[in-house]
Amino acid sequence: MGALLASLSMSSCRKTELEQITNLGYLPPFTLPDSLTLTYGQQVQLDLPAEYQNRPDIKLTLSFRDNPKGKVNATDSLTALLARAVTIDQATRKVTIDARQLYPTSTTSSSNGVRTPRNYLATLTATSSTGFQPVASHLKIRVLPAELNIAELTNADKIPYGYGIYDNKPLQFTVDYAGLDATNTVLVLEVNGRPDGKVTIDGRHVTVAADAGDSAQKYEWLYDLLPTLTKDGYRVAFRQFRVVLMPKPKFFFGAYYSAYNLTVLQDRVVIQLGKAYTSPAPTFSPEKYKGAFVLQSILKDGQPFSDSRQVFHIDATTGKVSVDPNTVLSEGEYKLTLQTEATTGLKLETALTLVMEQ
């Protein structure tokens, strides 16, 4: 009887201990974001609450079972891919998401026709060996393609523009990977619109042929280009840019009648010595490429002239040349050379000769 009572007493004690353990409540919530949007190539770390530090009794696990089944490349399933990209450091209690290991979401591979899901799904679970109830957090991960750069262009613009004139020389642009790891990637060129075979890619260099554009070289021609970095057929990075070919802009003093392609020069004017004068604005065509104007140089009867009294002026916006009333100039021919940098980056010059007579 005594042995029976002792056994019952010990069973009662174990039951009480188990009840105490299982009634400790839940582990602290993770406070992780429900969704996260990353760019291909980006890495982020998510910190767990401080209560998870120095807790060897807590085990953290990740699950990717809610994702579509099947392979996304020649060797890996989506689950295997995610297992490499989303990891836990048990020592620091940090969750690392490495978008270099993933493909952009909602993207179809040109190699195998597989389309990645709209979101990658991960479930983080914490379990306790000391009686706390487990907690879980569900995370949706969206990955966007990265953006390449074009070395020769201003990449601050959403769609950079490159300009060239018809001069029977090829144009070349260099694709900059902007820090992306190019391992196991392929750079290809997509040409929007109606490709004519005049734009090609070799390595990182996009070349516009010398005979590209309008065969008569009279009209503007636009190429809409899309260098694209692919990995296993998936588009992981790209950058759209446009190249505009055009005749050399017309820049001179006079009139231009575009309907007839007729130019009338008025670049030599006789004015009265010492009197004020303001010229008409120079012609610049196409107008949309006009930049600021500067006075580059002055020659007096073919010799350099120093305008120390600042008698000559130029309107930087219009290009109009003016002469102040003065008593310091002498009779002769004053050739003023103007320069403008078109919005295309092309620098152009023209001259106006003022013949000063009594």
Image (cartoon, rainbow, N blue to C red):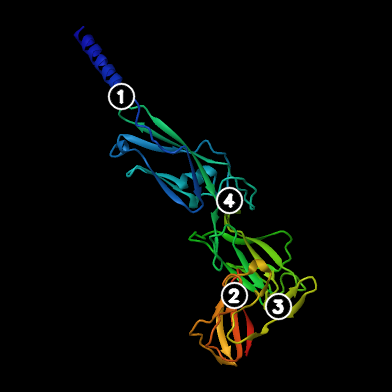
Classed neighbour count for the residue bearing mark 2: other residues with Cα under 10 Å, few (<14), some (14–19), many (≥20): many
CA–CA distance between discs 1 and 3? 92 Å
Q: Of tags 2 and 3, which is closer to the observer?
A: 3
Front in this rendered view, residue 25 or 151: 151
Query: Is residue 203 among the parts visible in the rendering?
Result: no
Sequence-wise first label, 1 or 2: 1
Query: Is residue 113 among the parts visible in the rendering?
Result: yes
Seen at 56% across and 66% down, the residue is: 153
Label number found at residue 74: 4
Position of residue 11 measured from the top left corner of the image (x, y, whole percent): 26, 15
Residue annotated with mark 1: 24
Label number found at residue 340: 2
Sequence-wise first label, 1 or 3: 1
Label number found at residue 254: 3
Position of residue 80 measured from the top left corner of the image (x, y, whole percent): 50, 45
Q: Quadrant of residue 321?
A: bottom right
Pointers 1 and 4 in contact (C-beta within 8 Å)? no
Q: Amino acid at mark 1?
A: Leu
Classed neighbour count for the residue bearing mark 1: other residues with Cα under 10 Å, few (<14), some (14–19), many (≥20): few
Q: Amino acid at mark 3?
A: Gly
Sequence-wise first label, 1 or 4: 1
Classed neighbour count for the residue bearing mark 3: other residues with Cα under 10 Å, few (<14), some (14–19), many (≥20): some
Above/below status of 337 relative to 241: below
Hey, which residue is sitting farthest left in the picture?
A: 2
Pointers 1 and 2 in contact (C-beta within 8 Å)? no
Sequence-wise first label, 2 or 3: 3
Sequence-wise first label, 4 or 3: 4
